[in-house]
Amino acid sequence: MTSCVSYFPLFHVMNDRLNLKKTIAKDSLASTDSLKHIAFIMDGNGRWAQKRFLPRQAGHIKGASIVRQLVLNCIQKGIPCVTLFAFSTENWARPDDEVSALMGLFLEHLKKEVESMRAKGVKLNVIGDVSRFPSELQKTIRHAMEVTAHNNVLNLNIAANYGGRDDVLKAVCAWQEAHPDKHISNLTESDLSSHLSTAGLPDPDLLIRTGGEFRLSNFLLWQLAYSEIYVTPTLWPDFDANELDKALVWFEGRDRRFGSVNI
Ligand code: FPP
C-alpha cells in the first residue's frame, strides 16, 4: 500500500489549487494581521542525521541551530507569538545520551541567546514542568525568563517537558484551587484557557509540523482546537525561510470558518 507521505506533493498541489483564494506577494505576508501565533512541532532531526550516516544528536544540533533564524524571520514578518515543541513528557523514554544531548543543547542555546533575545524584544516563556531538568538548566531558564519578562515584540514559548493533557489537567486543578468555594460545574472554557500555560496568549492560528507525520503528539491539545494544520515532509533541520514562506502562503489561502459558514 502506498503510504500517506508519498501523497504529499499531490496533497499540496490540490490544496494550492483549491484553497489559494488570492495570490499573495511574499512581502505582503509581513503585513498580515490574521496570523498572531504559530506553533511548531520540530520533527525529523533523527532522520536528517540518519540520512547523512550521522548520530541522531547531530540532527538535534543542526535542528537547534536553525531556531535563531526562524525566530528572526517571524519577528521580521510581524508575527507576535511563536511556540516551539522542544521536549515532550514522552521524550524521557529516549536513550539517556540523547536526552542529555537535548538538555545540553537547550542550555547552550539559552545561554548564548539570552542577551540577543533581550535586545530584540523577545519575551521567553518556557512552558512545561522543568522541575526534572538539571539545576543549571532550571536556573538559566528562570534567568532568561526574568531578563526578557518586559519584552513585547515576540512571545517565544518553548514547550519543554510539556504535555497537552497535563496542561489541561493542571489548569482545572489551578482553577479549583483559586475557587475552593465554587463547584467544578461553574468552570467555563474561558476560565480553563486562563489557567493554561499559554494564558493571555492567542491560540495558535497555524500549527506547522515538519517530518511528515499527521499527529499532534500531545502538543497544545486545547489551544489547537481551531488551528490550521500544515504538515510538510521537510525535516526540521531543513526548515528554512523559504519553507516558512510556503507555509504562510498556504495559510493565507485557508478559509477559516471556526465552525460557521461563509455566506
Ligand atoms: C524531534 O525529532 C525533535 C525533538 C524531540 C527535539 C527538538 C529539539 C530541538 C530542535 C533542539 C532544541 C531546541 C531548542 C529550542 C534549543 P526526532 O528526533 O523525533 O526526529 P525523527 O522523527 O526523525 O527521529
Image (cartoon, rainbow, N blue to C red):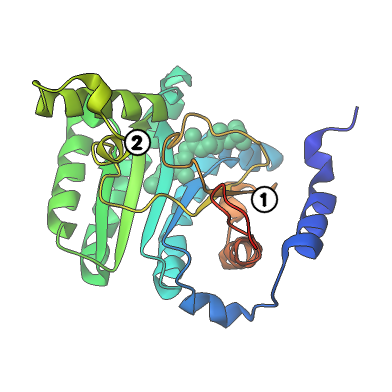
Question: Regarding mark 2 in the picture, which secondary structure is present there?
Answer: strand
Could you say where residue 75 lies in the image, as x and y percent from the top left?
39, 70
Residue 13 placement: quadrant: bottom right
Q: Which amino acid type corresponds to the residue marked 1 in the rendered image?
A: Thr
| Residue 142, placed above or below residue 167 | below
Residue at image point 63% right, 47% down: 235
Residue at image point 66% right, 65% down: 253
Q: Circle 2 is placed at which residue position?
A: 160
Query: 239 or 258: which is nearer to us?
Result: 258
Q: Circle 1 is placed at which residue position?
A: 234
Circle 1 crowding by C-alpha within 10 Å: few under 14, some 14–19, many from 20? some
**Position of the C terminus by quadrant:** bottom right
**Position of the N terminus by quadrant:** top right
In the picture, measured across the screen, residue 208 lies left or right of residue 96, that is: right
Q: Which is nearer the N-term, disc 1 or disc 2?
A: 2
| Residue 167, placed above or below residue 139 | above
Query: 252 or 157: which is nearer to us?
Result: 252
Residue at image point 16% right, 56% down: 149
Query: 84 or 55: which is nearer to us?
Result: 84
Whether label 2 lies within 8 Å of ligand 1 gets the answer yes
